[in-house]
Image: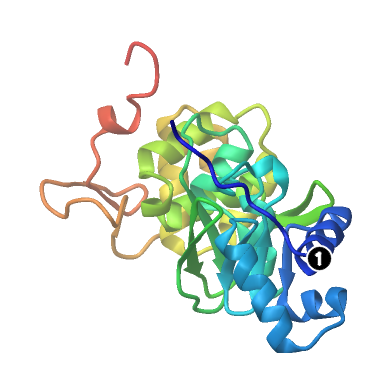
Amino acid sequence: MVIQKIKRFGEREVKLLFALEQENSPVFTISHARKILGTGDASVKNVLKRLKKKHRIIALQRGVYLFAPLKSGENGLWTEDAFRVAPSLVNGKGYYIGFISAMNYWGMTEQLPVVVYVALTSQKRNLRAVQANFIFVKKKRLGNFVPISLDGTEVNISSMEQTILDGLAFPQYCMGIGEVAKAIHFSRKKLDWEKLIRLAKQEKGAIRRRLGFLLELLGFKKHAKALNGHFSGFAWLDPTEQKAGFAYNKAWGLKINVEKRQTLEFLEGY
């Protein structure tokens, strides 16, 4: 016979949990907990320590915690609010959720990422929280993003058009060039094509070349033509793939190191 130990909560623990539940805010700081409890640092730290052991709060980083409500179960496993945690992890700095994470949100891929990719302009160490891995990708400048509301929390996510361009700049965070091609194909009726072309022209030449090449390959020749230009030198189609056995595409100034069949394998019957 297995006897389960009943978890009991002290008066201050209950007070903090009730206040956090009422606020419906997934992330809180030690200073906020101090304000709720109205006690000193030592007392607050003891309360937090006990709640961590009981899996009611999860430490995200120093002084920042995730509140795991009763719906998270006995072990405090909670994944549905991974996106909502992102703003707190970057301390309100410029950021957006992007890459394969954004592709999944916008319905551009059927892949279910176990990683939340966050683009920002500063360096930040990756971490694991709420049963998800957060990977922070440093960019020189953020691209186009859209603020969305998730249960009352505003979260920045890259627009569909920016998601494609970021995938061409960092294919390793989008499962490769082939997945970006698939995202373009599946979202072709929802994309703002004028916006995509305009944003592409603001990006580095290699990104513009890759987009033009993929659009032509996918049959969007009219849109590809809008990206034509004079390109000096050659860039890799996929900088993360092998650098041997490639072909040159002079029209787009690319070294094609991913086979056409591999890029378009998602198309039925190809």
Which residue is at a point 16% across and 47% down the rendered structure image? Answer: 246
Using the image as rendered, state which of residue 23 and residue 107 is in the foreground: 23
Using the image as rendered, state which of residue 267 and residue 106 is in the foreground: 106
The spot of residue 123 in percent (x, y) is 49, 78
Q: Quadrant of the C terminus?
A: top left
Q: Is residue 153 left or right of residue 135?
A: right
Which residue is at a point 54% across and 46% down the rendered structure image? Answer: 101
Q: Residue furthest top?
A: 269
The spot of residue 33 in percent (x, y) is 78, 74
Label 1 CA crowd tier, 10 Å (few <14, some 14–19, many 20+): few
Which residue is at a point 77% across and 81% down the rendered structure image? Answer: 31
Q: Is residue 172 visible?
A: yes
Q: Quadrant of the N terminus?
A: top left
Q: Amino acid at mark 1?
A: Glu
Q: Which residue is mark 1?
A: 11
Which residue is at a point 72% across and 79% down the rendered structure image? Answer: 44
Q: Is residue 50 left or right of residue 221?
A: right
Using the image as rendered, state which of residue 221 and residue 258 is in the foreground: 258
Q: Is residue 246 left or right of residue 141?
A: left
Res 58 → quadrant: bottom right
Q: Is residue 200 above or below residue 70?
A: below
Q: Is label 1 in a helix, a strand or a loop?
A: helix
Q: Is residue 162 above or below residue 61?
A: above
The spot of residue 217 in percent (x, y) is 40, 32
Q: Is residue 143 visible?
A: no
How is the model colour-coded? rainbow
Using the image as rendered, state which of residue 235 and residue 21 is in the foreground: 21
